[in-house]
Image (cartoon, rainbow, N blue to C red):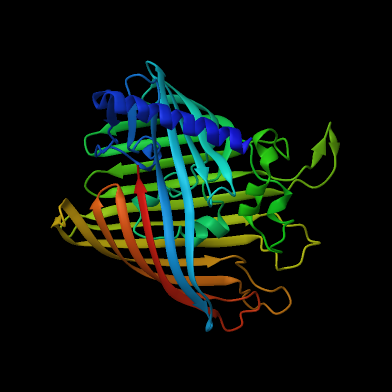
Amino acid sequence: MRTKLLSLLIVLISFQYSNAQIDSSLLRQVPADTSKTSMNMDAIYTRPSFQSNRLPIALGGYVEANYQHLGTDGVTEGSQFQFRRLSLFISSTISNRIKFLSEIEFEPGESSIEVEFAAIDVELHPLVNLRGGMIVNPIGAFNQNHDGPKWEFTDRPIFAEQMLPDTWSNAGFGVYGKYYQKDWSFGYEFYLTSGFDDSIIANELNRTSLPSAKENKERFEESASGKPLVTAKLALKNAKIGEIGMSYMGHAYNNFEDDGLILDDKRKVKVAAVDFNTTLKWTDTFITGEFAWVFVDVPETYSQQFGNKQRGGFVDVVQPVLKQNILGWKDAVLNVGCRLEYVDFNWGKFRETDGNIGDDLWNIMPAVSFRPNSQTVLRLNYKILKQRDILGNPPENTGGFILGLSSYF
């Protein structure tokens, strides 16, 4: 199946560019939506792509590759080269106000091929639009706005990968809409999809782990509990101030009932998140962050290493320090920045001692990035990670350099 999918994509791309070689005027770039009213919920629309007049589809994508040298408490694996991911975008305007958009990701290399997003949008009214297919659940902002070239940091936020399931997508349907009033924008999304299962507590990590549910490919065909995962988000943006979003996701995750027969207690998972971003006009400083809380009904038969509460988030601060023509690139930008991260995988106290449970981490990541254009970024990061075990022993210390390159194409 993977080979057939890859072959189809190669044929499409080859046909696209063979047409361009015949007549380059037939190939035009579909511009990204850079309007001031764009919000995080518009991330799937604000991607650059190319379209040939001979094909009904637009193609695009991005690629990420890194070099890193990291060590933990003096132990290192030396130099490591990584091909993080290759993502391909395929979109089409089927007819007036009916669109198809998709994202297919190869991560890393050819070891995993996933359809992250593949949905049809039917635009009824700016405030009421239908979406169905493979949907990225809008919990927080990063889950939707995760493209590598948009970020000055080589790694995705730790809380998004290890506490929340990053690029979390499921089969389902929903509605979304936006409303504009001068400098103000309001947006909402509401979806019913498939979702989590028992693997969030029954996994090889021996801890509560929402990302473990991504391994269950059957969620694209059936829900383990028979109940839909509800995901809802509200966002408010002011063109002069910034954007703030509040989101919720939750449902029963275990198979508690079969044909009316009660098999188990109903156990629920609930996630709440807050995200924000702003640009300080007088310095062009960009600040973005996100924080989330996870609540899971864990059976009493499980040990306390399976937390029923988790919390975590990040804040990025990016400051442009130079913008000018550099090496022939017009309006190239040099940035400095820093990411602050915190994740508590088991937020609570031991029942026996009333002492705080460990299993948490802090990370500081200074960064320098160079953008020859808005679609390409070369970034150098330094990781300073401290991680404690469940007993709260002195933390493991991880540090080192990561050099990365990411670009749309």
Residue 166 drawn at (x, y percent): 52, 51
Q: Is 387 or 49 nearer to us in this picture?
A: 49
Residues 75 and 12: in front is 12
In the picture shown, does residue 45 fall above or below 78?
above
Residue 215 visible within the image: yes
Residue found at the very far front of the displayed protein: 22
Q: Nearer the viewer, residue 108 or 369?
A: 108
In-image side of 288 versus 332 (left or right): right
The residue at the point 40 percent across, 37 percent down is: 44
Quick check: 21 left or right of 124? left
- Residue at the image point whose x is 22% and y is 61% from the top: 334
Q: Which residue is at the far left?
A: 325
On screen, residue 326 versus residue 9, left or right, reads: left
* Closer-to-camera residue (300/90): 90
- Residue 55 placed where, x, y %? 38, 21
Task: Find residue 332 and report its horizontal and vertical position in percent.
Answer: 19, 54
